[in-house]
Amino acid sequence: MASHAVVVVGAGQAGFDTACALRSRGFRGRITLVGDEPPGPSYRPPLSKGYLAGTVAAEEIALRPPSFYTEQDIELLPGDRVASLDRERRTVLLESGLRLPYDNLVLATGSRPRSLPVPGASLTGVLSLRGLADAEDLRLRLSGPPRRLVVVGAGFIGLEVAATARGLGHDVTVVEAQPRALARALTPTVSDRIVAEHRERGVRVLLGREVTALFGDAEGRVQVMELDGGERIAADLVVVGVGVLPNVELALAADLLVGDGVVVDAQLRTSDPYVFALGDCARFPSPHAGRHVRIESVQNASDQAKCVAAAVCGEPYAYTAVPWFWSEQYALRLQIAGLTAPHDETVTVGDPAEGRFSVFCFRGGRLTGVESVNRPADHGIARRLLTAGTDLSPGTVREPGFDLKRLPRTPTASPSRTTTQERLSVHA
Amino acid sequence: MAKITYKHPNGTVTIVDVQAPNTVMRGAKLNNVDGIEAQCGGSAQCGTCHVYVDEANTLPLPEMDSVEDDVLYGTACERTEFSRLSCQLPVGDEIDGLLVHLPEAQS
């Protein structure tokens, strides 16, 4: 193992956590972390919230201080990119000209924002938010006097940016093509509540509307957005949040199996046993979904990193972590445990009008996930139940006075390898 | 500046110096103390920075608010009367010498 070399491509949460998890497991070989985003690995969730609002400083979002990489003997190459991958010789060639041999390669290449496929999308003032540089740019533009901001896409990024910008006093409009916000991610009960909150705070939310074109002034700065039907909205700034695309180019060029993400097995190995993929760019078999999925979240990146590190160290296990996700908009603390879609039955506990409620989602009478608004105990307990595989029927949740806090606690010690394997085969 | 001691379930201890304004969670992350995950980065969302404050502790710690209390229902290891979210424990001179015990698992 001493001469073993691991090259991690991508220094986002997934790549960074893989390097850390390898060292935590006692891996003593060479670890090289190649990232194209200077200065180094940073924590992304604040980029649309505290960092954008100016309440969280850049030092606070660095995942570790620079000394960490020396201490842990992790070779960080920020600002470099992989130009090509030679799977036969097990080497990667970087754009800087550096050639790195590997025993295991880890693709943590992440994803990039989709652009808006309309005329004018490349005007100055039309932005998307992904990394630190984007956030810095947007923060600067939002730090001055009130501006007219139009957010395209009522997904998590778009709505978080809208909430933050509104909090800073800007005039905000959100345009969403789907008939409701967060349509793919959330039940109508929760997404309606979130939209209501935005409207109460003075954000104009337009649902079921398509952007058809953007027009600029003589200097090429965005000025006007045109919607279907011809309506025009004045805009000083446009933030596009219409989803992401997995970065699979390197995997494709190297003839790895790809299909909306780099396809991996339960241990997160690609079609090449020496190459792993994880995080936003990977499409993996999920026992919770019963199919291959790609998940864009910190939890997924972190938990998959542990799984990849274990496999590299020769102690593989199947990835079965319960997905969870969170968002903060104004005073709404939104948390999702499990994969709520698809479901065929929901039970709401608490009062959406009061802004404190949870929606329990079931498929075939089994709990698939829980969406919570300002009910963090429901979220945490639901994650424990889903991890332990505890059954909770819709009838139980419907009983008057039902309260997850009153359920007897079931132990959720981390699953042993045997039970993990058993659970996987049940779902296979 | 405060010295914080993290005691691992296997009995080993890590002692680090943490500057204000940080938290007991951030002190662990900055010093690469294993056993604190903090997947949400310190927003009291995930419960993966759970610690047990030493039973004999007399140092002044802030009262737990309702969000922290709620999040502690979801920890992977059993919650006790000594459970706290380390992201909700700010570091300052007054907690110099704090000892916290790390749970067996965070997620």
Image (cartoon, coloured by chain):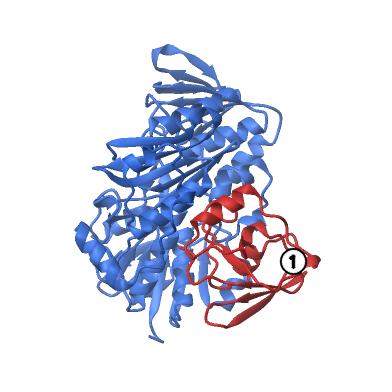
Chain colours: A blue, B red
- Residue that label 1 marks: B19
Of residues A320 and A82, the one drawn nearer to the viewer in this rendering:
A320
Please say whether residue A144 is visible from this viewpoint: yes
Of residues A173 and B12, the one drawn nearer to the viewer in this rendering:
B12
Look at 64% across and 36% down and name the residue there. Answer: A141
Image location (x, y in percent) of residue A293:
29, 50
Image location (x, y in percent) of residue A246:
36, 49
Left or right of residue A389: residue A80:
right
Above/below status of A306 relative to A110: below
Left or right of residue A395: residue A176:
right
Q: How many marks?
A: 1
Which residue is the extreme one toward the top?
A: A230
Say what secondary structure mark 1 lies in: loop
Quadrant assignment, res A278: bottom left
Above/below status of A285 relative to A136: below
Amino acid type of the residue that numbered disc 1 sits on in the rendered structure: Gln
Look at 43% across and 80% down and name the residue there. Answer: A27
